[in-house]
Image (spheres, rainbow, N blue to C red):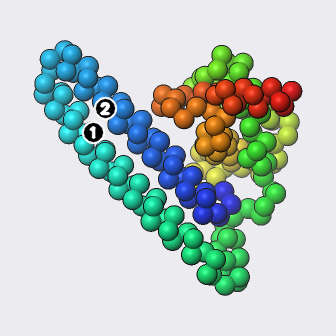
Amino acid sequence: MIENNPSDVSSAFEMLLEEVEAEIDFLTRIGARAFESRDYDKVGEARDQAEKVTAFRDRVAALRKEWDLISGSEAEEDEETRVERRNLGRLRKGVRTPESAYYVPILRALSDLGGSAKMQTVLEMVYAAMKPILKDVDHQPLASDPGIPRWRNSAQWARNTMRQEGLLKDDSPHGTWEISDGGRARLKESQ
């Protein structure tokens, strides 16, 4: 599992909002194609669904803002409460392969794949490159989703952080990872 950290929750909100935005874009494309083919019933359906998803996005964004406000109050907890909260079912720091270890393999995979690729393809290459350095705990399934090994979750969190740092493009199509100019520069520095 991911270390208990208010920024992890903020990152999760960002990932959720990104996926919801991708869904809104998808519905917009469906509506546009329906409009071009003069299927006005389908246009109405796409519009109605897009309005619902947009309202949901707005509620999630409001929750993210609320989280940002309350996560600042963590400093008011006493030390014992803070330690107890952080240790609930969590791995000790340093037990799993750090998220930053995934950066170069992700960048290299994307570079080798021509700059962009579907998530699954990238993850397969990242796993092949990192298999020799992954720890036993990285191969264990997540408690929250037994079908997903810990390394895969860490790689996806690394991708989110890399996107925030400008190493991966922020506007890639849903399910596609794409290296940015900043990512190419980082990869070049690492060689």
Is 143 or 107 nearer to us in this picture? 107
Answer whether labels 2 and 1 touch (C-beta < 8 Å): yes
Q: Residue at x 86, y 27 (%)?
A: 191
Q: Quadrant of residue 41?
A: top left
What residue type is disc 2 on?
A: Leu
Q: Where does the N terminus fall, quadrant-wise? A: bottom right
Question: Marks 2/1: CA distance?
Answer: 6 Å
Q: Position of residue 138 (x, y in %)?
A: 75, 47
* Res 50 label: 1
Residue 40 in view, yes or no:
yes
The residue tagged 2 is 27
In x, y percent, where is residue 43? 18, 28
Tag 2 secondary structure: helix
Crowding around mark 1 (Cα neighbors within 10 Å: few <14, some 14 to 19, many 20+) is some
Residue 61: quadrant of the picture: bottom left
Horizontal arrangement in the rendering, residue 114 relative to residue 50 (left or right): right
Mark closest to the chain's N terminus, 2 or 1: 2
State the SS at label 1. Answer: helix
For image coordinates 56% across by 59% down, the residue present is: 9
Give the residue at x 63% y 33%: 168
> In the rendered view, would you say 133 is above or below 181?
below
Is residue 125 something one can see in this rendering?
no
**On the rendered structure, is 39 left or right of 55?**
left
Q: Is residue 146 left or right of residue 64?
A: right
